[in-house]
Image (cartoon, grey):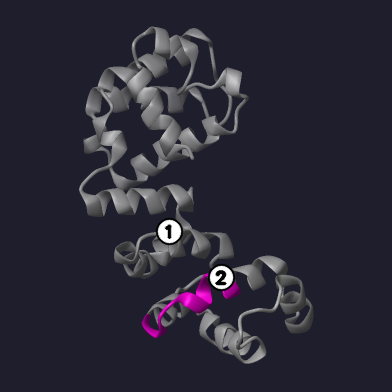
Amino acid sequence: MNYFKKDVELYEKYDPSGLRPIEDISKDLGWESQKSYAIKYFISELTHEELEILDRSSTPVSYAIIDAICLQKNEYKIKLLENIDKINAAVSPFTEIENLISQWDGIDPLFTIKGDYWIEVGDYLTARHIDLYPFSKKAISFIKAVGYKGYENLSRPQRDWLIGLLQSDKDRDVDDRFFVNEHLSQKGYEKESEIIKKYQL
């Protein structure tokens, strides 16, 4: 259970004009600046119904996640709030938001990637003798299996594992990435690499 509705009520009594700077809100209400920013610019803009849904979330939710949800189109916002626990528990909450929206739109970008791409990534890792967490030999075999089995046939936990690997790759040096690199471009996987780049945002 969260208490965003109470926080909004407190903020609106303190700053009815909405003109007070974040620094004053944080100082006078004893809030961290991130909380003050989220309450002032995002959470206070939610409807009564949306606030109640947010307060029903079973675990604490970061303000960054709430901000990201509030920035989405109104048609998605309430549906995302209804899935807040799922988003909060995801390996990458921001990617989960994208995944949910894609599902509602009937599109998941990873569905469009050819199986050959995943196999080529796995072969590339094998050729480089990569075996370091999270890119273990087991993970590399899994990446190849995605190519043979098809992304559409993966279970939700398997997709989460793959997405986790994509996010880990994003944190690597730009010149030493596994899913987006010159080798893959030379092999003709520029389109797939662009999809992966967007997925890793």
Q: Amino acid at mark 1?
A: Ile
Residue 49 pos. (x, y %): 37, 82
* Residue wearing tag 2: 41
**x 59%, y 74%: residue:** 40
Q: Is residue 78 magenta?
A: no
Graded by Cα atoms within 10 Å as few (under 14), some (14 to 19) or many (20 or more), the crowding at tag 2 reads few
**x 46%, y 58%: residue:** 89
* Residue wearing tag 1: 87
Res. 197 image quadrant: top left
Closer to the observer: label 1 or label 2? Answer: 2
Q: CA distance from mark 1 to mark 2?
A: 21 Å
Residue 34 pos. (x, y %): 66, 65
Residue 176 pos. (x, y %): 58, 19
Res. 198 image quadrant: top left
The residue lying furthest to the bottom in this view is 13
Magenta stretch, residue numbers: 39-49
Tell whether 170 sits left or right of 199. right
Helix, strand or loop at label 1? It is helix
Circle 1/circle 2 CB separation < 8 Å: no
Main SS, magenta region, reads: helix
Q: Is residue 41 magenta?
A: yes
Q: Which mark is residue 196?
A: none
Q: Amino acid at mark 2?
A: Tyr
**x 39%, y 44%: residue:** 160
Closer to the chain start, of discs 1 and 2, is: 2
Tally the marks.
2
Position of residue 80 relative to residue 183, above or below, is below
Res. 132 image quadrant: top right
135 or 17, which lies in front?
17
